[in-house]
Amino acid sequence: MQRKDLDQWWRSAVIYQVYPRSFADTNNDGIGDLPGIIERLPYLENLGVDALWISPFYPSPQCDAGYDVADYTDINPEYGTLADFDRLVEQAHARSMRVIIDVVPNHSSIKHPWFEDALAAGPNSPERARYIFRHSPDGPPNNWGSMFGGSAWSKVRPLTGKDEDEDWWYLHLFDSSQPDFDWSNPEVHELFKNYFRFWLDRGADGFRVDVAHGMVKVPGLPDDTVGPDRWTKGVRPESYLETRTMPYFDQDGVHDIFREWRQVLNEYGPDRMLVAEAWVEPPSRGALYVREDEMSQSFNFDYLKSPWDANHIRKVIDQSRREMGAVGAPVTWVLSNHDVVRHASRYGYRDTINREAGIGPRDPQPDRELGLARALAATTFMLALPGSAYIYQGEELGLPEHTQIADADRQDPTFARTGGKIPGRDGCRVPLPWHATAPNYGFGTGSPWLPQPDYWGNYAADREDADPTSTLNHYRKALKLRRELGLGTGDFRWVDSLEGVLVFENKGVTVALNFTDQEWAVQVSGNIVLAAGKATMGAQLTQLTLGPNSAAWVK
Ligand code: NOJ
Ligand code: CA
């Protein structure tokens, strides 16, 4: 292996996303915690992942499940202490797993001391200059809408009760509890440089950068082309984040920030990484985020958003490899995270309906069996692609989206901010089932912060552990083979394929995925080393027969 591959471990890593609130609860308050992650490190090691990415665990009023940060250098007391974090890093490292944490630089919580100081200090103060306050007597200062619905501006006066705040507003691209920082203010740059040093000193190996395409706004804050209430006015964004160029997204100035951060990381060594959450278009713009002196890699949302369509996926793979290749960055692959409908449910529809607003009890329901078969085939295919792969907690159990959450139990601010029109993201954030027969399926004995469906026991880790044909054991096998065969650092070439079937080769392994509902025969020699669904090899070992929605690795 070359020096670069050793340093830049993330280039081929399988990275497991832990959503701490829903992972494992050790003190039985219904909320996952850091000791819960520590307790399950052997499970993650046994699964075969190289790194964890842990979603925000900082002190927070939890108005957006921790993406509203009140203190960037401490741990939410509900989750544990800094000592727990240190233990977590130490024990993960001892098991050869790296730890990536989530940095939230576009906005803080309204409970961050800086925002509290800003409110107290009054209009035109240096304290207010850290955020985006504007005076506007005739309604909101511009037409920007919150990504969660409604206006992106809220009035200051109701928060302070002071006359001087009449007609003053503050900007929040997300919930009103998440005021946007003003990144033209050097103090904001200092805050985050100190943030990085704090966590790097404690052993963090990398950072997932929340809303990396945000932060910099066009001076003068001109109106955008969507306006408020993007969700409800029939303007269908491609995701909960609008991806078209907006005066607050994907501005060239963001790249100076990433260069600044890369310098800070370099003080600690070339093995510390940054991964971008950047919903930008076209892909050539996305590649700018991962130039050599900026971030290390970025989530491949084009891949995640692909419908169940062979041609579409083929194009995304080619495009991703081309664009990332042009800047020397590794390609990443991802199918699920805490913001989207789980892929086992997204693929559970025969039509191509857009499910990015979430699924609620009043929506057409996915076919669970179809969704799981396709999800397993899709993941099997994905894990053989060279580059880095992201796995979202619970997908290794084949968990579907919880699509029946009652309105009263919904927590995602999107639901309330759209007057209940958008179900939102709670369905993919439901606490994990660990034990089929334990209270709350072994998540913890306290009532979970989001309700679990009554069939959760079928997906419990202990039940799947004992079943050699389970999704869990399939993931374990796939990850072990991927490592042994070196597929993450492998090469890639398409093998001529049939309509509706994709076939590629990586390091002498032929990988095929049948997207259709028919059986297909593919000419390929070797033995099946991994199969999802129905796959058989002819007696001559030259023809692979793949059942509907099935995938295989042949060597
Ligand atoms: C992206 C995060 O993934 C999402 O969960 C959050 O709501 C927004 N950024 C705002 O921080
Ligand atoms: Ca707990």
Image (cartoon, rainbow, N blue to C red):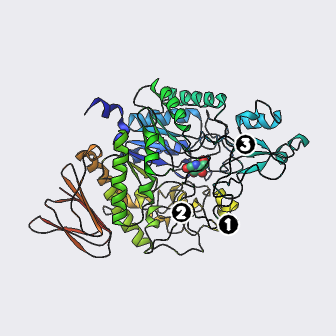
Q: Secondary structure at mark 1?
A: loop
Q: Secondary structure at mark 2?
A: loop
**Residue 525 falls in image quadrant:** bottom left
* Contact flag, marks 1 and 2 (Cβ < 8 Å): no
Q: Is mark 1 within 8 Å of ligand 1?
A: no
Q: Residue furthest top?
A: 267
**Amino acid identity at mark 1:** Gly
Say which residue label 2 marks.
356
Q: Is mark 2 within 8 Å of ligand 1?
A: no
From where the camera sits, is residue 113 visible? Answer: no
Q: Nearer the viewer, mark 1 or mark 2?
A: 2
From where the camera sits, is residue 126 visible? Answer: yes
Identify the mark nearer the N-term, 2 or 3.
3
Query: Where 59 falls versus 339 (above or below)?
Result: above
**Amino acid identity at mark 3:** Ile
Residue sitting nearer the eye, 394 or 386:
386
Q: CA distance from mark 2 to mark 3?
A: 28 Å
Q: Nearer the viewer, mark 2 or mark 3?
A: 2
**Amino acid identity at mark 2:** Glu
> Is residue 119 shown left or right of residue 280?
right
Say which residue label 1 marks.
420
Q: CA distance from mark 1 to mark 2?
A: 15 Å
Say few, some or many: other residues with alpha carbon within 10 Å of mark 1 (under 14 / 14 to 19 / 20 or more). Answer: some
Q: Which quadrant holds the N terminus?
A: top left
Identify the mark nearer the N-term, 3 or 1.
3
Query: Where 357 falls versus 350 (above or below)?
Result: above
Q: Residue furthest right?
A: 163
Say which residue label 3 marks.
110
Residue at horizontal 47%, vertical 39%?
100
